[in-house]
Image (spheres, rainbow, N blue to C red):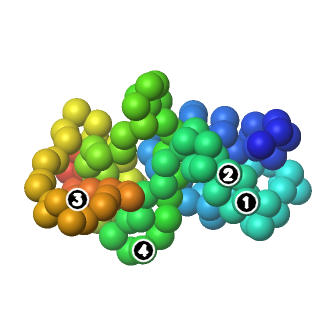
Amino acid sequence: MRKTIAKEAILKTINESDTALSQAEIQAILPDGLCNRVTIYRVLDRLVEEKSVHQITNIDGVVKYANCHSCSTEHKHDHIHFNCEKCNVVTCVEDVEPTFKLPSNYQINQLNFMVSGVCPDCLDS
């Protein structure tokens, strides 16, 4: 995908966030009038396809997007995603990689490990 103002702004927004963001959250952060909802979704689809960001479905079924800061040579997202039940923030917990054994006659195309509970910020407040 060629570099566009919208793509650069969306990627910058995701990369600067410590948490995964939904399309609506990204749109709220971007300058007014930069791009519409459809353009944001198209850019996000392309960024996922290019493996620049990864998508996570939270416990409410909302798709969120996070940067791929630890995917240098092998593209892996089999770490845990934590969804806070109080503030609804989704964070990547990359130092925990769950394991499981799937029968050999299954092919894995995508993993989504979602854990819900209360984040440290909400526990402290």
* SS under mark 2: helix
Q: Earlier in the sequence, mark 1 or mark 3?
A: 1
Q: Nearer the viewer, residue 63 or 118?
A: 63
Quarter residue 86 falls in: bottom left
The residue indicated by pointer 1 is 42
The residue indicated by pointer 2 is 46
* Structural distance between the alpha carbons of marks 2 and 4: 21 Å
Q: Earlier in the sequence, mark 2 or mark 4?
A: 2
- CB contact under 8 Å: marks 4 and 1: no
Q: Nearer the viewer, residue 63 or 48?
A: 48
Q: Which is in the foreground here, disc 3 or disc 2?
A: 2
The residue indicated by pointer 3 is 115
- CB contact under 8 Å: marks 1 and 2: yes
Q: Is residue 96 left or right of residue 52?
A: left
* Structural distance between the alpha carbons of marks 1 and 3: 28 Å
The residue that appears at 62% across and 61% down in the rendered structure is 23
Q: Which is in the foreground here, disc 2 or disc 4?
A: 2
Task: Pinpoint residue 91: horizontal percent, then vertical percent.
Answer: 36, 47
* SS under mark 4: loop
Q: Earlier in the sequence, mark 4 or mark 3?
A: 4
Crowding near the residue tagged with mark 1, few <14, some 14–19, many ≥20 C-alpha atoms within 10 Å:
few
Q: Is residue 87 visible?
A: no
Crowding near the residue tagged with mark 2, few <14, some 14–19, many ≥20 C-alpha atoms within 10 Å:
some
The residue that appears at 38% across and 74% down in the rendered structure is 60
* Structural distance between the alpha carbons of marks 4 and 1: 19 Å
The residue that appears at 52% across and 52% down in the rendered structure is 65
Q: Is residue 6 visible?
A: yes
Quarter residue 92 falls in: top left
